[in-house]
Amino acid sequence: MRAGDAAPGATSAHVSLHVRLAAAAATGAALFDLSRGRQASLSIAGAGLAAVLAAGGVPSLRVTVIGLIAAWAGYLVAFSLNDVLDRRTDAESLRAGKARPEGFDIDTAFSRHPLAAGKLTLVVSVSWVAGLTLIAAVGCLLLSPLCLLFFLLGAGLDFVYSGLRTTTWLKTGVSGVMVGCGGVAGWVAVAPLGRGVLPVLVYLALWEIGGRNLANDLSDVASDASVGVRTVATTFGMRAAARANLVVGAAMVASVAWLQMPLVAVLAALACGVWLVVRPGVALARRPSTTLAARYFNHASVYPVAVLVIAVAGLTIERL
């Protein structure tokens, strides 16, 4: 053997390691999209906004760190559990032609519905959901028993939502309450439950319905109709769904005025909402299409992050 030649065993081990690493990376990417990692990360802003408004500023370091971990795990649970429960319907939708929207899709980094597409096994997916649920539950319990209660309530509503997928378009209301529960969980992590949480609950529920749910259903109207999924778009048509989306989206932006923020922060959040939600919502209502629905969805998904940043800045300046 010449100097520099690799031994056959070493080459085989190197190839085996490369294969294992590639398989691990593929599984990690699939789990990320099972949980809609980007959307789950953005959703943390809802619970964060509730906590900031309840505390009148950024909570303590302990609450912030535990809250971030619990909220991230909790939202990963919400999205991955939905895909686990809907795996058969999602598989039918994929066979019917459901594909990733054209252009950038904030909901999908690598592949849509990886469990339904066969890129994950059910055992791995359920184990992933169970592990994340444990992390979220422990984190919520460390913050407040009520926080844990609202996390479990939100998870329960996820089962209800999935159970209604082929029954009624009214399930969109269930999704709104489910996301609102995440905001309430953020509130009770730092403050007692009271009427002050109602504006946050309303804002987040409207955001889920008019910012994400209706628009997402619009972008999937053809595949949903082919497998019997009942949505506003499949029941009443794209034009009616686009108009409903605009009305609810505009109401969501208007509800920001009810949040307990300084006036300058409210005005900034309203202006941001007009740009991110109302403007693309008007375009979608004028020309309903799956492409514009996906574009609207992408813009509206980041709105709570913008409101959170504005709220933190406004409350911090007010304290100075």
Image: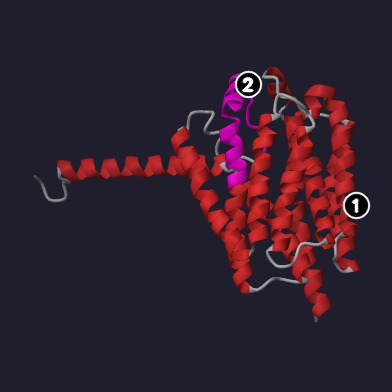
Looking at the image, which residue sits at the far bottom? 320
**Residue 12 at what x, y percent from top left?**
22, 40
Q: At which x and y percent is residue 129?
A: 52, 44
Q: Are marks 2 and 1 in contact (CB under 8 Å)?
A: no
Residue at (77, 43) in percent of width and height: 176
Q: Which mark is residue 45?
A: none
Secondary structure mostly seen in magenta is helix
Residue 20 located left or right of residue 310: left
* Residue with the mark numbered 2: 97
Confirm whether residue 308 shows in the render.
yes
**Helix, strand or loop at disc 2?**
loop
Q: State left or right for residue 240 relative to residue 147.
A: right
What's drawn in magenta, residue-wise? 77-104
Picture colour scheme: secondary structure
Amino acid identity at mark 1: Ala
The amino acid beneath tag 2 is Gly
The residue shown at (88%, 62%) is 266
The mark total stands at 2
Residue 103 shown in magenta: yes
Nearest to the eye among marks 2 and 1: give it: 1
Q: Is residue 207 above or below residue 46?
A: above
**Mark 2 to mark 1 CA distance (whole Å):** 37 Å
Mark 1 nearby-residue class (10 Å; few <14, some 14–19, many ≥20) = some
Quarter holding the C terminus is bottom right
Image spot of residue 125 (x, y percent):
49, 38
**Percent coordinates x, y for residue 273 in the rendering:** 84, 52
- Mark 2, other Cα within 10 Å: few <14 / some 14–19 / many ≥20: few
Q: Which residue corresponds to mark 1?
A: 254
Up the image or down, 143 lies above or below 214; here it is below
Among the two numbered marks 2 and 1 on one chain, the one whose residue lies closer to the N terminus: 2
Is residue 316 shown above or below 165?
A: below
Indicate whether residue 173 is drawn in magenta: no
